Image (spheres, rainbow, N blue to C red):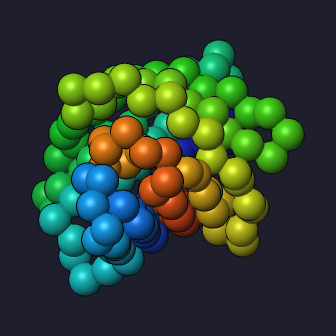
């Protein structure tokens, strides 16, 4: 995990969006010069930084947190968007980076039923 990463794909499926019977899906492939790209850097001391980069290359919304790896899962703890987030991701190595999958309460409705799938690549 100790490296710099860029998110190349993100999908969040929320089956009970805000405790309703509606399903919401957010998906982004970060192609065609997107407005922002998510990046992160993981350090050997168990800390990490995550931020966005705009089209001009300027960084914004930087946050810091801690991470640990157990078996095939990455566990992160950080503060973002006005809330404390503690979430685990199943990590599947890929040729360019990794695929991460987590179940969490991404829509903040009290139900930990939202599925996030992301793909990353190493930034060299």
Locate residue 19, reporting x and y percent. 30, 53
Residue 111 at least partly seen: yes
Is residue 5 in view from this perspective? no
The residue nearer to you, when weighing 38 against 104, is 104
Residue at horizontal 54 percent and vertical 21 percent from the top:
66
Report the side of 44 relative to 26 (left or right): right
**Quarter of the image where one finds residue 101:** bottom right
Q: Residue at x 22, y 42 (%)?
A: 59
What residue is shown at x 61% (from left), y 57% (from top)?
A: 100
Q: Depth check: 102 or 105 in front?
A: 105
Residue 87 place in picture, x, y as percent: 54, 36
Give the position of the N terminus as an image quadrant.
top right
Quadrant placement of the C terminus: bottom right
Q: At 58% from the left edge and 52% from the top edge, which residue is drawn?
A: 102
Q: Position of residue 37 (x, y in %)?
A: 30, 59
| Up-down relation of residue 116 to residue 86 (above or below) | below
Task: Give the residue furthest to the right.
Answer: 71
């Amino acid at each position: 995990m100790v490296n710099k990463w860029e998110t190349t794909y993100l999908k969040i499926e929320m089956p009970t969006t805000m405790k309703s019977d509606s399903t919401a899906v957010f998906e982004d492939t970060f192609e065609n010069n997107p407005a922002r790209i998510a990046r992160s850097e993981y350090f050997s001391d168990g800390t990490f930084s995550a931020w966005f980069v705009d089209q001009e290359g300027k960084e914004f919304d930087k946050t810091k947190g801690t991470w640990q790896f157990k078996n095939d899962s990455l566990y992160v703890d950080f503060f973002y968007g006005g809330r404390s987030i503690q979430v685990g991701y199943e990590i599947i190595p890929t040729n360019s980076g990794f695929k991460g999958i987590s179940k969490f309460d991404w829509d903040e409705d009290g139900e930990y039923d939202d599925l996030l799938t992301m793909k990353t690549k190493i930034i060299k």
